[in-house]
Image (spheres, rainbow, N blue to C red):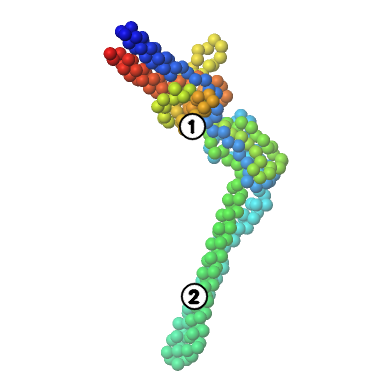
Amino acid sequence: MRTLILLLKLTTVVAAAAATAAAQEPVEAITRPSKDVTLAFVRPGKIAKVLVEDGQRVTEGQELVVLDDTAERIQLAQLKAQAEDEIRVRAAQAQLDQKKVDLRKLEDALRNGGATTMEVEHARLDVTISQLSLQLASFEQQQAKLKHDEAKAQVDRMRLTSPLVGTVQHVHKQRGESADALEKVIRLVQIDPLKADVAVPRPQVGGLKVGDAAEVEFDDGPGRPPVRAAGKITFVAGVGDAASDTVTVTVEVPNSPARPAGQKVRVSFPAAVASAATASDRKAAKGSQP
């Protein structure tokens, strides 16, 4: 009986040690850009300028490609002139001021017997009409400003700017070519930081959560020692893959050396090791109880 108990304790300790060793085993993955975007125009047009080339570094907001916007800029200038034109508003205001003066004179004349009630009522109606004319002129000017803003937005859409700090992966269109709406024009990638989607065996996932530390090991080639970099978890899948019994965990790691994406790496998770070690201690303690 005593021998059987010892064997059970030994089995528990061995199983706990195996779990810890499994948690310490790095998992292979392939790095990818943290951002990968392909830009396109929302309207068709002819490419007038291509301001970057493949492999060029770009900053956020940098202008990349421009469509021919000659006609649109002429229309924009016309709408700008209309939006800034205050002649109609000033003329309507002057007319209103004159109608108010006429009304006051007729009201004075009415009190002195020099005007009729009907003449005064007509003058009051003229003031009301002039007030409405001023409001209409102001409204039309506001509409002109809105049309100008809309046209400016359309012109802005004829320019592609970078939404990120990264590298031009490929320019699909060149100067002089036509681009249809939503047709690929330029692809940008951001490789600092890098990301890797790691298929972690389900038993190793444990209590891993977003924000936990991860260690990423890069192989820099034959004869060179592997380079380890500290990363962090940015995503833990809520659904695993039953066929492989794995759960996808996305890791983000700084990439100041600008290593290209698509490199094989080995990823380990200190939190998984700590969790497995704690579980091992508990099993060992439980197994040591008589």
Question: Against 262, is 99 above or below?
Answer: below
Image side of residue 212 versus residue 50, left or right: left
Query: Residue shown at 49%/27% (left/top)?
Result: 247
Quadrant for the N terminus, please.
top left
Label 2: element kind: helix
> Label 2 sits on what residue type?
Asp
- Spatial CA span between label 2 and label 1: 74 Å
Query: Residue shown at 28%/13% (left/top)?
Result: 290
Residue farthest left in this picture = 290
Q: Residues within 10 Å of mark 1 (few under 14, many from 20)?
A: few
Q: Which residue in the structure is indicated by mark 2?
A: 97
Viewer-side residue, 10 vs 250 = 10
> Label 1 sits on what residue type?
Val
Q: Quadrant of residue 277?
A: top left
Question: Against 255, is 144 above or below?
Answer: below
Labels in figure, total: 2
Q: Is residue 24 visible?
A: no
Image side of residue 275 versus residue 189, left or right: left
Q: Residues within 10 Å of mark 2 (few under 14, many from 20)?
A: some
Label 1: element kind: loop
Query: Residue shown at 65%/54% (left/top)?
Result: 74
Residue farthest front in this picture = 1
Residue depth check, mark 2 versus mark 1: number of the one nearer the observer: 1
Q: Which residue in the structure is indicated by mark 1?
A: 239
Label located before the other in sequence (2 or 1): 2
